[in-house]
Amino acid sequence: MQIAALKAATVVPISAPKHQRKLSAVLLGMKYSARFDPDDAGASGAARKLRQLETLGAGRQIPPGKVASYGQIALLIPPPMGVDFDSYKAFAPRWVGGAMAACPDDVPWQRVINSQGRISERPGAERQRMLLEEEGVQFNQGGRIDLKIFGWQSSFEEPEQPPLL
C-alpha cells in the first residue's frame, strides 16, 4: 500500500502490516509508540484508547448519505495481539458500538448501523433515523436501509464485480 493511499484512507485494514498501521495512527494525529501499540496486550488502557480513536477515525470517513455496519468498521481496525481473528470478529462490532455511543460531536455516529441494515433499538434511535433521512438515506416499510444502495464501501473493500454478459 502506498503512502498516498494511506493519506486518502487514513484507516488501514487489519490485514495491513504493522508499519502501515503505525503510519495510519500518525495520519490520524495519534501518538504511536510501543506503549500505545494496539498489538501489545499489556497496554490495555492505552490500547483501548488507540482503538477508540481508530474507530472514530473510521466513522469520520463515512460520507453523508451512506451507512456502514458496526462489523464493517471493526474490520478496518486491527485485532489486539494474541486475539485470533474469529474471536475478534465476534466481539469487535459491540466494541465499535460502545465507541460510537461515546463519540464526540464531530463523528457522524448516525451513519453506523447494524448488519441487518437497521438502526439498533436504544434511546436515540428515532434521532438517528431522522438524521439519516435528512442526509437522503431511505428506509423501507420494515425500517431497513438497503445496503446495496446506501452502504459505504471503504477504499479497502473489494467492489462488487459486475455480472459478466
Image: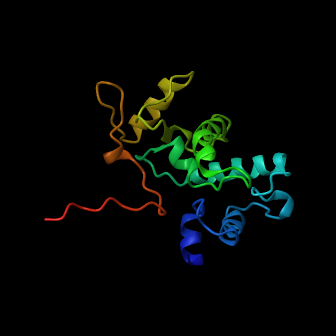
> 41 or 58: nearer the eye?
41
Q: How is the image coloured?
A: rainbow
Residue 120 shows in the view: yes
Residue 106 shows in this picture? no
Of the 4 image quadrants, the one containing the C terminus is: bottom left
Q: Is residue 84 above or below residue 162?
A: above
Which quarter of the picture shows residue 2?
bottom right
- Count all numbered tags in the image, as a single digit: 0
In the drawing, does residue 143 fall left or right of residue 112?
Answer: left
Q: Residue at x 80, y 56 (%)?
A: 40
Foreground residue among 18 and 112: 18
Q: Is residue 107 above or below residue 17?
A: above
**Residue 73 image point, x, y percent:** 55, 48
Q: Residue drawn 60% across and 67% down?
A: 16
Q: Is residue 28 above or below residue 5?
A: above
- The front one of 137 and 164 is 164
Q: Residue furthest left?
A: 165
Residue shown at the point (69%, 50%) measured from the top left: 83
Picture quarter with the N terminus = bottom right
Residue 88, how many percent across, how many down? Answer: 63, 46
Residue 86, given in percent of the width and then of the height, sits at: 58, 47
State the image coordinates of residue 115 (x, y, percent, origin top left).
Answer: 45, 38
In this image, 151 relative to 38: left or right?
A: left
